[in-house]
Image (tube, rainbow, N blue to C red):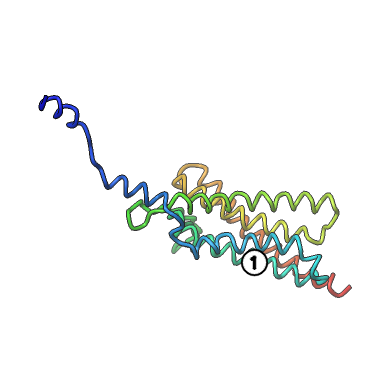
Amino acid sequence: VPQALVDDTEDVSLDFGNEEELAFRKAKIRHPLATFFHLFFRVSAIVTYVSCDWFSRSFVGCFVTVLLLLSFDFWSVKNVTGRLMVGLRWWNQIDEDGKSHWIFEARKVSPNHMATEAEARIFWLGLIICPVIWIMFFFSTLFSLKLKWLALVIAGISLQAANLYGYILCKMGGEGDISKVASSFLSQTVFQTVMIFQESGLLGLDIHKC
């Protein structure tokens, strides 16, 4: 009988470390402030765009407000929330020869820097859903012939799609031809967005004068 008891228990493994790691990953939000601002700016931009006609008749005021919210969202997601919530980041670096290089990084997983499942889910859902909403705004703007908003909608798509592509490349490791395609896309997006801002600013002034 004693031998049978030994055989029944010899394969039992008490790995408390894995249980603690699993409990940590399923824990609630670890970075509440970063999680809040990850959604705040992009949701605020969408809400302001939808409701600005109800609360204000100033096209320039609404345009600038939404544009600022989109810019704050782009900066915070690119530089802060991605690094804290999922351990990813991307940026552009210019070497000594003046060539532009896009760098995609994924932080090594460690107990002190581990994203929780809740944070990762919120990060990716916000990163994917909001550009889809701006694409819907693009088609609704065309169909309703509200062309004065078209530049703003394109800016929203460009900024949020740039972050989405950047973080997808970070997740995939930034390797292969996809990295070159995404790098080209990011550089074109930044250039086109700057041009849109300049052109839309002049357009906004003309409409305001009328």
* Crowd band around label 1 with a 10 angstrom C-alpha radius: few (<14), some (14–19), many (20+): some
Vertical side of 126 occupied by 72: above or below: below
Residue pictured at 77% horizontal, 66% vertical: 52
Image quarter hosting the N terminus: top left
Where on the picture, by quarter, is residue 66?
bottom right
Q: Position of residue 92 (x, y in %)?
A: 50, 60
- Looking at this rendering, what residue extends furthest in the right direction? 210
Instruction: For mark 1, give the secondary structure.
Output: helix
Q: Is residue 156 visible?
A: yes
Q: Position of residue 115 (x, y in %)?
A: 42, 53
Q: Is residue 99 visible?
A: no
- Looking at this rendering, what residue extends furthest in the front direction? 1
Q: Position of residue 149 (x, y in %)?
A: 78, 60
Q: 190 or 119, which lies in front? A: 119
Q: 59 or 50, which lies in front? A: 50
User: Which residue carries the number 1 mark?
Assistant: 69
Residue pictured at 73% horizontal, 49% vertical: 136
Where on the picture, by quarter, is residue 55?
bottom right
**150 lies left or right of 192:** right
**210 lies left or right of 93:** right
Q: How many marks?
A: 1
Residue pictured at 48% horizontal, 51% vertical: 118
The kind of residue on which mark 1 rests is: Leu
Q: Position of residue 63 (x, y in %)?
A: 74, 67
Vertical side of 75 occupied by 158: above or below: above
